[in-house]
Image (cartoon, coloured by chain):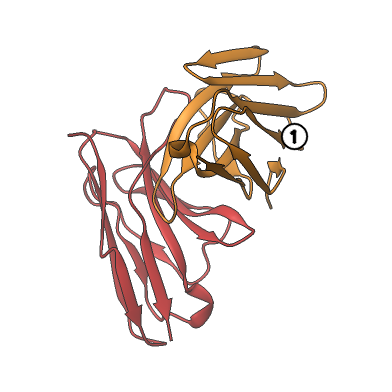
Chain colours: A orange, B red
């Protein structure tokens, strides 16, 4: 079953605007990751936030994590046409470094950025 | 260049005809994994491997087999493909002791008629 659920399913914005998408999950996690997928291609890792972190930045990306609400958000600032892609959150529920952590992916948010 | 490669990238086959999708990585990853991606369902894990000769089932292993005889290769085998295995398949690798950040191959689009 899916652990992460992204919202919205689809998002259409203009270049220069910000894009925000949310991810909710069900069980305790070790970390949460965001991936991008260009149409029909492999996923590319964007950013990882650990369960003891609340916010993280990477370039134009900002990720927040609220473990009390079991939710995360990904903000893309000043979007560009090249940001058009599907974005997935993935949760790692691994408890110890000895146990292999299975990533659970959500169904994704499809983002279209028009020039 | 560090990468995960898959072959073939596209495959159309018929029900019951055994096929193998290869996956190879040059990043010395201990862990490798196979996923299938279907519309509205995200990625679901089929099998994973923690090292050579160590494999285990993921969430949707039925109808698939894997092997890990060498560290760099992790083929996915469909002994008797069926139409419900029509999907987009991804192989991924990652390092032990890290945070499970996965490096994905380009994908294999499989159609079973």
Residue B34 in the image, given as x and y percentages of width and height: 42, 53
Residue A61 in the image, given as x and y percentages of width and height: 54, 22
Comparing B106 with A11, the one in front is A11
**Quadrant location of the N terminus of chain B?**
top left
* Residue at x-position 42% and y-position 56%: A40
* Residue at x-position 31% and y-position 69%: B10
The residue to which callout 1 is attached is: A27
Q: Secondary structure at mark 1?
A: loop
Q: Give the answer, above or below, for where B32 lies relative to A77.
A: below
Quarter of image, res A69:
top right
Residue B81 in the image, given as x and y percentages of width and height: 42, 79
Residue A109 in the image, given as x and y percentages of width and height: 62, 45
* Residue at x-position 70% and y-position 27%: A72
Comparing A49 with B78, the one in front is A49
Quarter of image, res B110:
bottom left
Q: From the viewer's perspective, tell me whether residue A99 is left or right of residue A71.
A: left
Q: Label 1 neighbourhood size at 10 Å, few (<14), some (14-19), many (20+)?
A: few
Count of numbered tags: 1
**Quadrant location of the C terminus of chain B?**
bottom left
Comparing A92 with A81, the one in front is A81
* Residue at x-position 53% and y-position 23%: A48
């Amino acid at each position: 079953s899916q652990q992460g659920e992204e919202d919205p399913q689809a998002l259409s914005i203009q270049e220069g605007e910000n894009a925000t998408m949310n991810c909710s999950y069900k069980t305790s996690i070790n970390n949460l990751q965001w991936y991008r997928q260009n149409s029909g291609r492999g996923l590319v890792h964007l950013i990882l936030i650990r369960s003891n972190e609340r916010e993280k930045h990477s370039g134009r990306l900002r990720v927040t994590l609220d473990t009390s609400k079991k939710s995360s958000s990904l903000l893309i600032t000043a979007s560009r046409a090249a940001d058009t892609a599907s974005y997935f959150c993935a949760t790692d529920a691994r408890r110890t470094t000895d146990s292999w952590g299975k990533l659970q992916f959500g169904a994704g948010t499809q983002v279209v950025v028009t020039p | 260049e560090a990468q995960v490669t898959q072959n073939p990238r596209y495959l159309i086959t018929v029900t019951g005809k055994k096929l193998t999708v290869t996956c190879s990585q040059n990043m010395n990853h201990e862990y490798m994994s196979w996923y299938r991606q279907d519309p509205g369902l995200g990625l679901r894990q089929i099998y994973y491997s923690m090292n050579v000769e160590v494999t285990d089932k993921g969430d949707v292993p039925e109808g698939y087999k894997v092997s890990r005889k060498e560290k760099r290769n992790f083929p996915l085998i469909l002994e008797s493909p069926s139409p419900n295995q029509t999907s987009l398949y991804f192989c991924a690798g990652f390092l032990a002791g890290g945070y499970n950040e996965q490096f994905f191959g380009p994908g294999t689009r499989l159609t079973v008629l």
